[in-house]
Amino acid sequence: MKIKTVDFYFFSGTGNTLMVVKKMQETFQEKGILMNLRKIEESNQEDIDLKHTIGLGFPIAELSTYNFVWKFIRALPETDQNTEIFMVDTLAGFSGGIVGPVHEIVKKKGYKPIGAAEIVMPPNIFYIQDEKICHEKVQKGLEKAKRYALDIISGKSKWGRVPVLSDAVYYTSIAGLKVTESNLNQKLLRLETNDEECRRCGICVKLCPVNNITLAEDEYPVHGFNCEYCLRCTSFCPRGAVSCPVNYKGKTYRAVKAREFLK
């Protein structure tokens, strides 16, 4: 089936996935294929057009992806139109718990899985690499994104799974995500704003995909206890006022400017 229109639903934490998605959009459109970009955190599954090819893009978190991204995927509408679907994720190293499980979810809903790719990009958590290494990884990642898009267009892309391994890693990931959302973890690893540095610009509030940050009039941002650690707030704060308790020496990483997310 020739692809005519793609609706690409994606989430990007600190910008890696956004760059990959835009490179794929550029490649598709060079071949005359319309690609609409939709932010997962702002999308409603009921609005999905099952006559279009569907794309899914997101970062890896705890060997799979974030809880709110999983919720979006699991709530995709069922289809009897054999709707084509592909996915891409960005990661620093290893996932193992995402490609196979997502394949099974969408297949059971009636979709036709046509491609999956995992693209290595610079890490944004724990240890932040130097600028030169990050730049080289980005360039290699974007080249792979272009090749992947061309493979989808030509029908060469594939989406397979390794049942035992992927299922085992998936359940390990789900257990880890439950720990992450636990009250104890949220209290111990809470991201907070330094009021002395904060200028109350509200960028962190606008960027939080799960509305975990609030900003009352004449007050400073307040972080709740439902953080999914996408690190947007700590990476894009113009004053560096939001610290990340798990990053080495407090370093942060962002692949794009904050305005790319606020469009």
Image (cartoon, grey):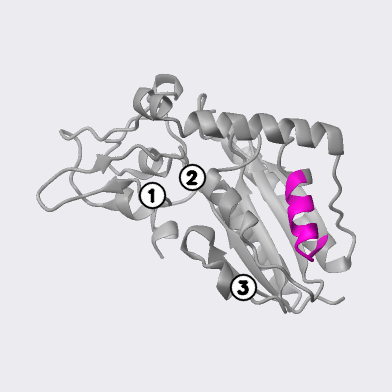
Q: Can see residue 53?
A: yes
Task: State which mark lies toward you, 2 or 1.
Answer: 1
The three-letter code of the residue at mark 2 reads Thr
Tag 1 residue: 208
Residue 37 drawn at (x, y percent): 57, 67
Residue 230 drawn at (x, y percent): 47, 41
Q: Determine the residue positioned at 72% across, 55% down.
A: 87
Q: Quadrant of residue 174?
A: top right
Q: Is residue 3 above or below residue 54?
A: below
Tag 3 residue: 48
The three-letter code of the residue at mark 1 reads Cys
The three-letter code of the residue at mark 3 reads Ile
Q: Determine the residue positioned at 45% across, 30% down.
A: 182
Queried whether the magenta region covers residue 107, the answer comes back as yes
**Which quadrant is home to the N terminus?**
bottom right
Queried whether the magenta region covers residue 97, the answer comes back as no
Q: Is residue 160 above or below residue 136?
A: below
Name the side, left or right, on which 238 lies relative to 170: left
Q: Nearer the viewer, residue 120 or 216?
A: 216
Callout 1 touching callout 3 (CB < 8 Å): no
Q: Earlier in the sequence, mark 1 or mark 3?
A: 3
- For mark 3, does the 10 Å Cα neighbourhood hold few (<14), some (14 to 19), or many (20 or more) residues? some
Callout 3 touching callout 2 (CB < 8 Å): no
Taken as a whole, is the magenta stretch helix, strand or loop? helix
Name the side, left or right, on which 177 lies relative to 20: left
Q: Which residues are magenta?
A: 101-113
**Which quadrant is home to the C terminus?**
bottom left
Q: Secondary structure at mark 1?
A: loop
Question: What distance separates the C-alpha of mark 2 from that of mark 1?
Answer: 11 Å
